[in-house]
Image (cartoon, rainbow, N blue to C red):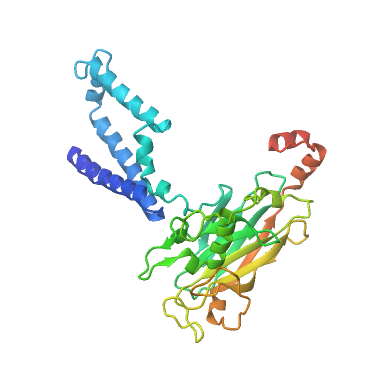
Amino acid sequence: MRHWVNLALMFVFGTLVVTGVVAFLLPFSQTNTRLHVVSGVVCAALIAKHVLSRITYVRSALAFRSKVVGPVRKTGVLAFWTLVLVASIMALPPTNWLMDQSYETRERLQIVRSSSLVGFGQTTPHRRIVVRKAKQDTNASLSIHLGYSTWLDQLPTTAVWVESTTGTMIETLYLDESIAYSDEISGRDTPLRRRDVLPIWRHAYTAVSGIDASGEVDGMTGATQNHSFELDRYLELGQGNRFVVCVEVNLPGDVNEQWSDVEWGQPSLLYTALIDVDSESPHAILELTGHGGGLQSDGNIRYDLETITTARGIVDLFLAKLELPRRDVIEARETHPHGIHSPSQIAADSP
């Protein structure tokens, strides 16, 4: 059994090292992360088994007056461990230099991450859901249900974001993993970039972030100082807030007579819905609004949809829904206008 544990530990530890290097040098991958986490758990279990099989040695080594490991060696090991911890936590050299070589640091301008308040997942093979929770429990939350046609062998590349009624991006809620961590889509014979596949989203993102399509800082663009990149202000009730939910999808290779390039096919499609936070209806169906223009697109929306044929069938139903806060939370806020938001306080005030 001992030899089995040793060999298994060697292979699992090797997998842990390789996946760690991949995570350090390359864009984020769910598959690599899953393999790394599972290998870490298995490695920890094997180490525990190994330590338990040598518990006598471990006890003697850790004993105060150990003859196996003297106090000088134990002090040295403890000092080394402490030095590593302190240097890592405080980003002291050379740990800061090491992290500067990681993909996350080198490509930070092109990595797009949603707010920590956003959750998303694939409920069925052809259904996705994106949920944006509010910071305050007295505000509404937003969910977008993305239903694609069941005949699709693969889902289209998708971006979900919200804009003000004047057309300025407020917040990106979802971006496909294939394009969220790198400006270039991986796994294709012909290199595809965000501006090629999702030109409308990329154009809106550039306008507010100041990061152009090549990942460089564009001094000619960027939001004004009073622009808010968070949706929370727009989710407040009773303020007459309105915003637009946008979803851009693209399935490269979906050709027709007008869009005959076998690699690109028909352009990306934009679906939108106007959300009135104070509306009596919590639902809004996203309607086909325009397309991205295909090759050499400048990111502007094209509203001529006569040439779009089979690409219309990619989407089954896109639906936005506002989740309103509980009535007792709203009543508590009206009773305590300066803010009582915890469930315990609300329960204490309830009759």
Quick check: can you spot residue 272? yes
Residue 269 percent across, percent down from the top left: 57, 72
- The residue most toward the top is 65
- What x and y, as percent, mark residue 2? 19, 37
Residue 198 place in picture, x, y as percent: 52, 66
Name the residue at 39% across, 31% down: 92
Left or right: residue 260 compared with residue 69: right
Is 260 situated above or below 333?
below
Using the image as rendered, state which of residue 326 and residue 176 is in the foreground.
Answer: 176
Indicate left or right for 159 with 323 as reference: left
At which x and y percent is residue 182? 43, 57
Task: Quarter of the image for the C terminus: give it.
Answer: top right
Frontmost residue, 119 versus 150: 119
- Can residue 125 be seen here? The reply is no
Residue drawn at x 23%, y 29% is: 54
User: Is 169 drawn above or below residue 73 in the view shown?
Assistant: below
In this rendered view, identify the residue nearer to me: 257 or 298.
298
**Which of 239/123 is in front?**
239
**Quarter where residue 61 is shown:** top left
**Splitting the image into 4 quarters, where does residue 344 fall?**
top right
Horizontal side of residue 155 vs 59, given as left or right: right
Residue found at the very far front of the displayed protein:
220
Q: Quadrant of the N terminus?
A: top left
Using the image, determine if residue 268 lies above or below residue 88: below
Count the marks: how many?
Answer: 0
* Residue at the (47%, 51%) spot, across then down: 109
- Asked if residue 80 lies left or right of residue 277, the reply is left
Q: Is residue 196 above or below residue 52?
A: below
Determine the image quadrant of residue 288. bottom right
